[in-house]
Amino acid sequence: MELFPAHITINGQLESIEKLLQQKPPSEWEQNWLDFLAEWYHPNDAIEVQTSGSTGTPKTITLKKDFVAASAQRTIRFFDLHEGDRIMHCLPSRFIAGKLMTVRALIGKLDLHLVDPSSDFVDLPSDKPIKFAAMVINQVKKFLALPKQNIENLLIGGSAIPVSLEEQLQQISTNCYSSYAMTETATHIALRKLNSNDKTDCYNCVDGISVELDKRDCIRILMPGLKNGAIQTNDFGKLIDSHHFKVLGRVDNVIISGGIKFMPEQLEKKLENSMPLPFAFSSVPDELLGEKMILLVEGEADEQVKTSIAFQCRKLLQKYEQPKKIRFIDLLPRTENGKIDRKRLRCI
């Protein structure tokens, strides 16, 4: 495996790394891409990456380059990518998922098709298919609006896949996968097939990786290259076996009301197809219950909409799962990559 080849193929053209690093691109997203390329070729044996902030304050961590390359190789093997195959890079290069697209292209000698992350994808090449791409939810929605989906394998990450979106994916021939990933593991350690006849309802660890549960029933990842060979998560999990598991929610998001534990992610999944506006479950302190569960809805207060939402809650949730209050707010707090910011949500 060659980590630092002298050339990379960009949009079908073999380009000199040295010459690329001398360029002054016109846009911020292209500059971010070149900044990472320069960091990868720097003599340091590690890169700096920023966590998303979805589980706390964003922080900068370092990852060894050979550890990052090993993750890239696992993806190349899983999706059977070969020299010259075209892959699309449409993610911000400031975060680990975007960085890995470049590393995959370098070590796999792949043809990297660079696209502005804010693109609507109308100019995707049609001369040959894109063998592999990775997107976040908002990008997938734009992709589905195209008259033709010219991507063979699509990795979807950044947040949980809405049921409504998963239903839409059943209508396209692109092989779609949900990723279980974190910055500390240099992107995904497990994948879930979302469509076609071989879709699954659990995550399957990629080669060389396994999982177990701790005493809290939270997922612990066993992975080569990690300190002590493992990393502890705060994700509640259900284990099928050491290589197959389900993610139920985060321990730090749990709402304990009247002695009962509620996972907001699970409640939201029950309602997501029936809600007219963006929403999230949260809680406020309560002398009697400890925490009182509330439903926050993004949008202008409207009694008719509120009545409709209350009806859906009664219809789709158990009696003990009902929110004690429905509150409208201007905007739900989100992290930079679009996830609901649960910590800020509880301060509203």
Image: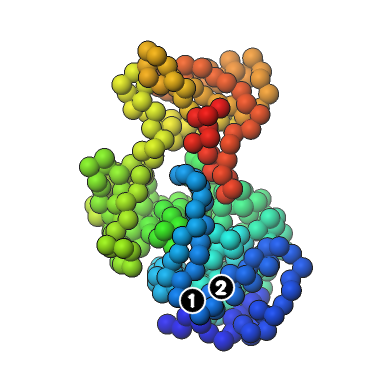
Discs 1, 2 touching: Cβ within 8 Å: yes
Position of residue 168 measured from the top left corner of the image (x, y, whole percent): 55, 46
**Picture layout, residue 63 above or below residue 291:** below
Write down the quadrant of residue 88 in the picture.
bottom right
Q: Residue furthest top?
A: 288
Viewer-nearest of labels 1 and 2?
1
Q: Amino acid at mark 1?
A: Asn
Seen at 62% across and 26% down, the residue is: 329
Position of residue 35 measured from the top left corner of the image (x, y, whole percent): 62, 70
Position of residue 200 measured from the top left corner of the image (x, y, whole percent): 38, 50
The answer to whether one can see residue 95 in this image is: yes
Name the element at disc 2.
helix
Give whichever of 122, 336 is nearer the camera. 336
Q: Which residue is mark 1?
A: 44
- Which label was assigned to residue 39? 2
Seen at 59% across and 48% down, the residue is: 336
Q: Residues within 10 Å of mark 2 (few under 14, many from 20)?
A: some
Label 1 vs label 2: CA separation? 8 Å
Seen at 64% across and 77% down, the residue is: 10
Choose the circle earlier in sequence order: 1 or 2.
Answer: 2
